[in-house]
Image: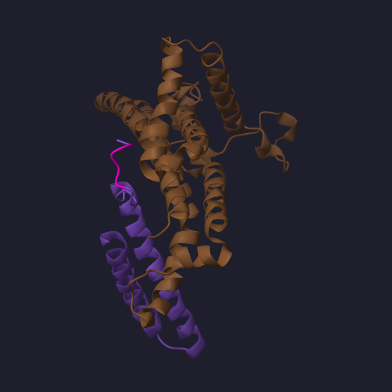
Chain colours: A brown, B purple
């Protein structure tokens, strides 16, 4: 947290250790349970609470002509249901809309912490959080396919490419297997993690770099510090764009994976 | 939007096609490059298998992309 510029400048340049936080319960610090309750987990709990309370409040007394909050909640769900679930999966995609909307809102709010003042870090900039979400999607993706095609049928469905000469199959099947069944959750989580990690790093570099320039002495460098801070603001706005896009992409790709699991043919 | 879709599978979304292509290229090189590397280790060859595996796996990945995303 930004409290004392002189203290922060000593932390320049920022590194991986800038992402580590001390336990909020001092007696647990340094023990195995130290990472269990840090600023990051607090932000996750807060995000969950905000999402639950927001949707409970806005849907408590739904009116035919929605008020502002109800309109916001309905349009978020509507966008996910119409533009992601049914557009990609088809008419039966409606039954995945609750899951997709939950993923979208949760990823969006946890991403949003990266630019909220005083929070200013997204839990998703630690690989563990996107990894759990990706594993959820992956389990559902595999489960849907197995339920639809049977275990061996699903294996064939997702690894054997029709319309290929028989002798090419031994070359292609391992590639399809790795790409479709193993690499997908990894790329899904790494994409979100890397974007949020890089975004936080960029903001740190410009903000702390500005402090370092300001404190470095020569009067000539003071304007450069102001330029650095101005760019930090620009990058914060850019981060807002990136974090919304990543929440959308995560949901979109989850939907495409479900679609490929329940589709009849390739 | 949802009603005027063809009964067949809707066309691949642009973003998804891009990620799928990347996945195929990567896994082609990982799988067959890895297999070649293992053969190198086994027979004590100087990275011949790794080279052949990387190039062949990359080519197979490109072939898969054409087959799957062009249909």
What percent of the width, then of the height, locates residue B21?
A: 32, 59
- Residue at 46% x, 64% y is A157
- Residue at 40% x, 60% y is A265
What percent of the width, then of the height, locates residue A240?
A: 36, 29
Image quadrant where residue A168 sits = bottom left
| Residue A128 part of the magenta segment | no
Residue A154 seen in the figure: yes
Image quadrant where residue A129 sits = top right
Residue toward you, B66 or B49: B66
In the figure, B28 relative to B36: above or below?
above
Residue A127 seen in the figure: no
Q: How many marks?
A: 0
Residue toward you, A226 or A192: A192
Q: Main secondary structure of the magenta part?
A: loop
Query: Which range of residues does the magenta coloring cover?
Result: B2-6
Q: For the view shown, which residue lies furthest in the right direction?
A: A27
Residue toward you, A16 or A247: A247
In the figure, A102 relative to A32: above or below?
above
């Amino acid at each position: 947290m930004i409290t004392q510029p002189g203290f922060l400048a000593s932390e320049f340049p920022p590194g991986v250790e800038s992402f580590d936080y001390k336990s909020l319960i001092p007696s647990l610090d340094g023990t195995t349970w130290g990472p269990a309750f840090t600023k990051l987990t607090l932000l996750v709990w807060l995000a969950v609470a905000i999402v639950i309370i927001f949707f409970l409040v806005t849907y408590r007394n739904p009116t035919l002509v929605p008020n502002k909050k109800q309109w916001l909640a309905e349009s978020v769900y509507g966008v996910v249901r119409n533009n992601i679930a049914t557009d990609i999966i088809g008419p039966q995609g409606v039954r995945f809309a609750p899951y997709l909307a939950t993923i979208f809102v949760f990823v969006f709010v946890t991403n949003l912490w990266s630019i909220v003042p005083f929070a200013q870090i997204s839990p998703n900039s630690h690989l563990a959080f996107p990894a759990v979400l990706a594993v959820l999607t992956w389990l559902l993706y595999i489960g849907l396919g197995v339920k639809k095609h049977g275990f061996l049928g699903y294996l064939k469905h997702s690894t054997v490419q029709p319309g290929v000469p028989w002798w090419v199959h031994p070359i292609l099947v391992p590639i399809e297997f790795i790409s479709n069944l193993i690499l997908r959750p990894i790329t899904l989580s790494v994409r979100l993690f890397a974007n949020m990690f890089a975004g936080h790093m960029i903001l740190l570099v410009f903000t702390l770099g500005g402090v370092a320039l300001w404190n470095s002495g020569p009067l000539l460098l003071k304007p450069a510090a102001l330029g650095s801070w101005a760019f930090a603001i620009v990058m914060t706005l850019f981060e807002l764009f990136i974090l919304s896009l990543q929440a959308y992409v995560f949901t979109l790709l989850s939907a495409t994976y479900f679609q490929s699991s329940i589709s009849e043919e390739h | 939007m949802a009603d005027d879709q063809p009964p067949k599978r809707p066309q691949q979304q642009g973003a998804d096609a891009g990620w799928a292509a990347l996945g195929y290229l990567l896994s082609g090189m990982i799988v067959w490059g890895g297999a070649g590397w293992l053969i190198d280790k086994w027979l004590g060859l100087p990275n011949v298998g790794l080279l052949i595996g990387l190039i062949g796996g990359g080519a197979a990945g490109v072939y898969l992309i054409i087959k799957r995303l062009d249909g």
